[in-house]
Image: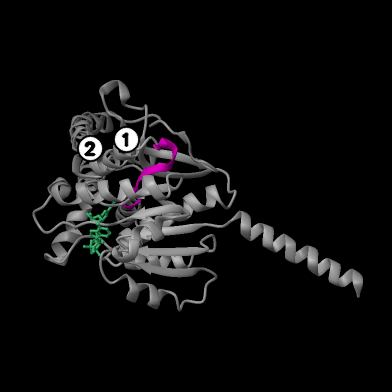
Amino acid sequence: MFAASRIASVASKRAFSTSAANLSKVAVLGAAGGIGQPLSLLMKQNPHVTELSLYDIVNTPGVAADISHINTNSTVKGYTAENDGLKSALEGAHVVIIPAGVPRKPGMTRDDLFNTNASIVRDLAEASAKYCPDAHFLIISNPVNSTVPIFAETLKKAGVFNPKKLYGVTTLDVVRASRFVAEVKGKDPKDCKVTVVGGHSGVTIVPLLSQTGESFTKEQLDALTHRIQFGGDEVVQAKNGTGSATLSMAFAGARFASSVLDATVGGKKGVVEPSFVQSDLFKDQGVEYFSSNIELGPNGVEKINGLGEISDYEKELISKAVPELKKNITKGNSFVQ
Ligand code: NAI
C-alpha cells in the first residue's frame, strides 16, 4: 500500500515537473482575422501549448469562447485593446504569432500594404518589447520583407532584440512549392520537398528546383517558378476582393509555430524550417535579412543553412531578388529610424 502510494506520488511529481518545464503560452495577435481564427484553432490542437492568448482589436471574446470548448489541455483567453488587453495577452508569452493587419485586394502587391501594416507591426513590437521581450516572434503580417526589419528595429530601440528569436514566416511558399511540383510530377507532395529562399514577395521568392532531384523542361521551370513566386495572386483573384490566403496560411503558420515549439520546449533535435531571419548569407551585398533553411534549437535559430549548389537559372533569380530585398529591408528600417 505504502509502496504503491509512493510510486503514485513520484509519478505525479514527474508529471508535474514535465508539464512545468514545458509551460508555453502562445499569443496570436490579429486572432479574429481570416488567418488568425484557423491558426488559433490549429494551435489549440498543439500539445505543447498550455495557454492560448488571443488578441485582436475586435471580436476576440467570441473567437476565444468558441475555441475554448475544444477538449485539449490548454486554456484559452481572448483580449481586446480594452483594459490593457495587449499587456495581459503578451505577459508570460513564450511564442507570439502575428497575423495582424490588412490583406491584399486584386491588383495589389504586398508592398502596397506597407502604409497600413507598418505602424500596426511597430506598435505590436513596442508592446512586445515591454511585456514579453524574451518571446519568439513569428511575423506573418505583410510585407514580411519589411515588417521583420520594422519589428527588429523596434526591439533594438528598446534594447531587447535577439536575432535568434525573430522569424518572418515564409513557410507558405514552401508548402505551395511542394504542392505545385507534386502536381506537375504526379507525385504525393510529401515526396516533393522544395527549398525556397530569398524573401516573401514576387521576385524575391526563389525556389531551388534544381535541388529537388526532379528534372524539368525549361517551360516547366519557367511556369513553376512563376507559379511559386506569384501563387498568392491566384488566391487573391479567386477571393475577388475579400482577402488573400488565410486557410493555407494558417496551415503553414501552424506548421512553423509547431516546429518552434518542438525545438524550444519539446527538446526535439534537427528541426529545420525555412524562415526570413537576420542572416549573413547576402550581407556583403547589403541584404541584412534573408530566408533560407534554418535549424531550430532550444534558444531559437541555431544554424542558418547556406544555399548549397544552385543552377545558373537560380543564380539569375537570386540576382533579381537581391536588389528588391535590399529595397524592402531599407524601407522597413527607415520607417523605424
Ligand atoms: P484579416 O483582415 O482577415 O485579419 C487581420 C486581423 O488583424 C483583423 O481581425 C484585424 O482586426 C486585426 N488587426 C488590425 N489591426 C490590429 C492591431 N493593431 N492589433 C491587433 N489586431 C489587429 O487579414 P488576414 O487575411 O488574416 O491577413 C493578415 C495579414 O497576413 C495580412 O497582412 C496578409 O497580407 C498577411 N499574409 C501573410 C502571408 C505570409 O505568407 N506571411 C500569407 C497570407 C497573408
* Amino acid residing under circle 2: Val
CB-based contact (under 8 Å), mark 1 and mark 2? yes
Image coloring type: one colour
Residue 38 magenta-highlighted:
no
| Label 2 near ligand 1 (CB < 8 Å) | no
Q: Residue at x 22, y 37 (%)?
A: 336
Estimate the spatial distance between the alpha carbons at disc 1 and disc 2, rounded to whole Å: 9 Å
Quadrant location, ligand no. 1: bottom left
Location of mark 1 (residue): 157
Residue 194 can be seen in this image: no
> Measured from the top left, where is residue 167 in percent x and y?
37, 44
The answer to which of marks 1 and 2 sits earlier in the sequence is 1
Q: Is residue 257 left or right of residue 215?
A: right
Q: Residue at x 15, y 45 (%)?
A: 111
Q: Dividing the image into 4 quarters, which one contains the N terminus?
A: bottom right
Q: Dividing the image into 4 quarters, which one contains the C terminus?
A: top left
The secondary element bearing badge 2 is classed as helix
**Residue 68 position by quadrant:** bottom left
Q: Residue at x 38, y 42 (%)?
A: 166
**Residue 83 position by quadrant:** bottom left
> Measured from the top left, where is residue 288 in percent x and y?
30, 30
Who is closer to the viewer here, 84 or 232? Answer: 84
Who is closer to the viewer here, 263 or 85? Answer: 85
* Location of residue 190 with respect to 288 vertically, above or below: below
Q: Which mark identifies residue 336?
A: 2
Q: Which residues are magenta?
A: 160-172
The secondary element bearing badge 1 is classed as helix
